[in-house]
Amino acid sequence: MRTSGGFFVKRCILSAAAAAIGLALAGNAAAAEAGKCKVGRIAEWPLRAGSYRPVFDGAINGQKVGILIDTGSAMNLVRRSATTRLGLTRHQTPDRVIGIGGEEQAEYVHIEEFRIGEGVRKGWEVLAAGEGSFSDDIAVILGDEYFQQVDVEFDMAHNAVRLYETRDCDGVSLAYWATTEPAGEVPIESGSKIRLTVSINGQSVRAGLDSGSSASMLSKPDAAHLGVTPESPGTVAGGCILDGLGGRRQLDSWIGQFESFTVGNERIKNPKIRFADLWRNMVYTETGSRLPTRLAGQPDMLLGADFLRAHRVLVARSQRKMYFTYAGGTVFPSNPWKGCSQPSSGKSTPDPLPKPAEK
């Protein structure tokens, strides 16, 4: 099953990296070699300096579009509103998507030419669904299926995302930039999503790396298990989250005070972390059934773009590790904001806030 920007699609898709959408990358990357370890840079994408999330420019049928890198989304999607703006015809498909607001029927579009970096894909058929809390010109959600067989580096401080092909590097640190102090290392789970274990208040928490979510967020039940609820002293409203399927439903979020957050060799004392009942509506109905089924296997926490902006991160699927170093700034920004039931002042909820749903 699955997603993009908060959607799950009932379809089995086995694909990886550039092959996932058939991109033909021009030229050969230079390889760095240390013994048997070989690392070749496949691509480097310059990110938009004004975007909080990792967004870069591409083109659909000659028209410039924004592309969001969304490791929380299992698959690639084109936003439904973008298909109208780009003059793309939507076609029926049996696939459905689900966000925190519920299920929605998906469609698909045929794209004559899709340009991304130095790659060009001709005749791309891709699902179209939902909206999400993104700027209007973001048309494409580049999901985790694109990155499953490459190593990806998030260097947000220098507005860059880089892709690497890595071979025979077991036991070799791939954090090449960490020359003064060793980089943190965290094992990542095998499988199609980026999952790792962190610690909050000394207890293990299963986290998902979600570059498409502006803010990191803990699930409400897990926050309660750690002793923090909306009624806890010091807890404040953290904003109203809209679902990614057109904003039909909303979720309140809160900002709570925790004792500690630890990932690898990094420990943060007294962090203020957002939490919300993220998975409350993550249910779907099987064909031929009227009974909703809750989507299982969701992480306890999302590590979003705020975490990535405060670190330099290399997700090395070749080693099942995530390398990171602290780059500066607040890891978990905690600006309070109005809840869903409070009157709006006419201003939008401030970034960072997560996109709705998990992938």
Image: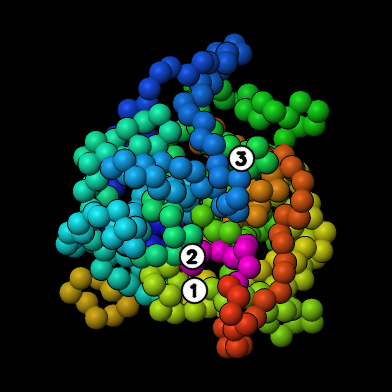
Q: Which residue is mark 3?
A: 159
For numbered disc 1, what is the local secondary structure?
strand
Q: Is residue 152 magenta?
A: no
Residue at figure coordinates x 62%, y 82% from the top left: 345
Q: Residues within 10 Å of mark 3 (few under 14, many from 20)?
A: some
Using the image as rendered, state which of residue 6 and residue 202 is in the foreground: 6
Determine whether label 2 and label 1 are within 8 Å by CB.
yes
Q: Is residue 36 above or below residue 265?
A: above
The residue under label 3 is which amino acid type? Asn
Q: Nearer the viewer, mark 3 or mark 1?
A: 3
- Quadrant containing the N terminus is bottom left
For numbered disc 3, what is the local secondary structure?
loop
For numbered disc 2, what is the local secondary structure?
loop
Q: Does residue 74 appear in this view?
A: no
Instruction: Residue 250: give x, y in percent of width and height.
Output: 49, 79
Q: Which mark is residue 146?
A: none
Q: Is residue 351 magenta?
A: yes
The residue under label 1 is which amino acid type? Leu
Instruction: Residue 352: give x, y in percent of width and height.
Output: 63, 62
Q: Which residue is mark 2?
A: 133
Q: Which mark is residue 242?
A: 1
Residue at figure coordinates x 32%, y 72% from the top left: 103
Residue at figure coordinates x 44%, y 49% from the top left: 66
Question: What is the span of residues highlighted in magenta in the rendered image?
Answer: 349-359
Instruction: Residue 50: give x, y in percent of width and height.
Output: 60, 50
In primary-sequence order, the first of circles 3 and 1 is 3
Examine the image and state in which quarter residue 320 appears. Answer: top right
Determine whether label 3 and label 1 are within 8 Å by CB.
no
Q: Is residue 171 above or below residue 226?
A: above
